[in-house]
Image (cartoon, helix red, strand yellow):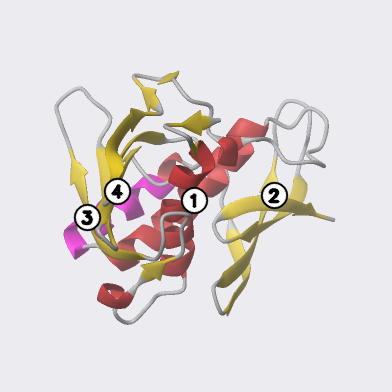
Amino acid sequence: MLVNEIYSYSFEKPALYLLSLLLGKPNDISELTVPSDFGLLRFKGMDLLQERGQIPKLVLDFELEGGSLRTVYFGHVSPFKLGNVQLIQEGRAEINHVFSDAGKVMIPMQAATEIAGIPAGLNWNIVAGSLSLWRACCGLPNGCEPSLGKYFNKMKTVSRYQWENISYELKGDEIVEEWTACVTDAVVHGARVVFVIKNGLISVLRD
């Protein structure tokens, strides 16, 4: 889907890629850069905005040549949780767009699209949502203040499944991860699944 003549995927990918970088436990987050459709992004930091009675909002700030990108997620980085974005870039009108708000999706998030090969009866949103939450709880503490890191560590208890990272490989700008868990629901009982994640995007369900 196009947002101000830019594919929505372009707004989704930077934070998902950043999460993959953080899972590698970088020594110096001030040096982190993220490839994007807007040019190379430099990670500037994250903050958590909390208001009574509302889901906390995670704010990620990036700097780019001649501008900035801000992405806001509900609770944690996830392909299902993008709230809004702000893009300021020289030569382009400022973009402020809402992807979702108060549980209502305004713009379908392409990174949340169900991949091929999901076992019949297994709920994609639950499984992929659980994996995304678990990865966020493992990776985000590596890019923020310790007090904020404790918040993400506690969120693991909310995950439907417990995931194990069995592979993490960084080659140039490409990051490939493999995560596994034993999943169970009303139809599928105790099936072990392995997901391959490339550059932060769930891409393959491995046999």
Marks 3 and 1, Cα distance to the nearest angstrom? Answer: 23 Å
Residue in view at x 40 percent, y 25 percent: 100
Q: Who is closer to the viewer here, 103 or 52?
A: 103
Q: Who is closer to the viewer here, 85 or 30?
A: 85
**Mark closer to the chain start, 2 or 4:** 4
Q: Indicate which label's residue lies in the foreground, 3 or 1.
A: 1
Region rendered in magenta: 145-156
Q: Taking 10 as reference, is 189 left or right?
A: right
Residue at disc 4, secondary structure: loop
Quadrant of the frame with the N terminus: top right
- Find disc 1 in the rendering and name its residue: 13
**Main secondary-structure element of the magenta-colored stretch:** helix
- Find disc 4 in the rendering and name its residue: 91
Name the amino acid type tagged 2.
Cys
Residue in view at x 46 percent, y 64 percent: 35
Marks 2 and 1, Cα distance to the nearest angstrom? Answer: 27 Å
Residue at disc 2, secondary structure: strand
Tell me whether circle 2 and circle 4 mark residues in contact (CB < 8 Å): no
Crowding at dot 1, Cα within 10 Å, few <14 / some 14-19 / many 20+, comes out as many
Q: Indicate which label's residue lies in the foreground, 1 or 4.
A: 4
Q: Is residue 160 visible?
A: no
- Find disc 2 in the rendering and name its residue: 182
Name the amino acid type tagged 4.
Gly
Q: Indicate which label's residue lies in the foreground, 4 or 3.
A: 4
Location of residue 168 (image quadrant): bottom right
Residue 125 in the image: state x and y as whole percent.
60, 32
Crowding at dot 4, Cα within 10 Å, few <14 / some 14-19 / many 20+, comes out as few
**Mark closer to the chain start, 2 or 3:** 3
Marks 4 and 3, Cα distance to the nearest angstrom? Answer: 36 Å
Which mark is drawn over residue 148?
Answer: 3
